[in-house]
Image (cartoon, rainbow, N blue to C red):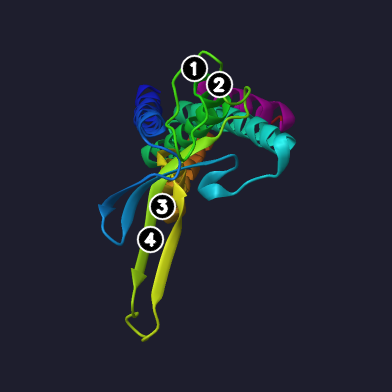
Amino acid sequence: MKKAALIVFSVLLIDQFVKIWIKSHMTLGDQITVIENFFYIHFTENYGMAFGLELEGSYGKLLLSLFRILAVGGIGWYLYTLIKQKAHSGLIFSIALIMAGAIGNILDSAFYGLIFSESTPMDTAVFLPQEGGYAGFLHGAVVDMFYFHTHLNSGFWSSQPFDFTFPIFNISDSSITIGVIIILLFQRRFFRHEKKEDAAEANTTSPAQTSESKGQVSENNPA
C-alpha cells in the first residue's frame, strides 16, 4: 500500500509542479525549444480528455469531469483489491500510474478555474486573483505542454516533405499511457501470477475441513 501511495504521490507532485510553473510563467501558445525540430514545451489548454479530445459544451465538460471522478474511484478500489490479494508488483505499479494520471487531470479540471485567472496569448495567469478564477468547479481547463513535431524537407523514402506532429500532452497523460502499455506488454505474466495465487488458495484446505468432509462421507456410506 505504501509503495503504491508513493508512486501516486510522486507522479502528482511532478505533474502539478510542472503545470503550475507553465501556467504562471508562460502565456497561452508560448513555446520553448528543447530539441530543435523535434521536441518543444508548448503551453496549451484543453477542456476535454487526453491529447486534446473534447466533449462539446459545458455539460459535456461536466459529464467528463464526473466520469473521471467515478473512474478514479473504480481504479482506486481495484488497486486496493490488488494490494490485498498480493498481486504482481508490476500490475500494482501500472495501476498506480494510471490512477495518478487520472487524478492529475481531475485536479486541473476541478480547481484551476477557481485558483487561476485566464491564460491568454498576451498575459500569464495570476494565482488567486482578486476578481476570482476564470471558471467554476469542475469546469477548468487541463494544462498541456509536451509537443513533438518534426518537419523534414524530404523523407527517408521520398523526395516529398515529411511532417510529423503528435498531439500535445502532459505528465498525467504520459502516466496513464505508460501504465496501460506496461499492462499490455506484460499481461500474461501479471495475470498468470494472479491465477497461480487463486489456484493455491483453492488447493489449500484446512484440517478441520478435511475431517468434516471425511465425516460426511462416512455418514453417507455406512459400513
How far is mark 1 from mark 4, CA to CA? 35 Å
The amino acid beneath tag 3 is Phe
For disc 1, the marked residue is 129
Q: Is residue 142 left or right of residue 90?
A: right
For disc 3, the marked residue is 186
Q: Earlier in the sequence, mark 1 or mark 3?
A: 1
Q: Is residue 85 left or right of residue 62?
A: left
How far is mark 1 from mark 3, CA to CA? 47 Å
How far is mark 3 from mark 2, CA to CA? 44 Å
For disc 2, the marked residue is 133
Mark number for residue 149?
Answer: 4
- For the point 34% across and 80% down, which residue is it? 154
Q: Residue farthest to the front?
A: 122
Q: Earlier in the sequence, mark 1 or mark 4?
A: 1
| Residues at discs 3 and 4 in contact (Cβ within 8 Å) | no
| Part of the protein shown in magenta | 205-221
Quarter of the picture containing the C terminus is: top right
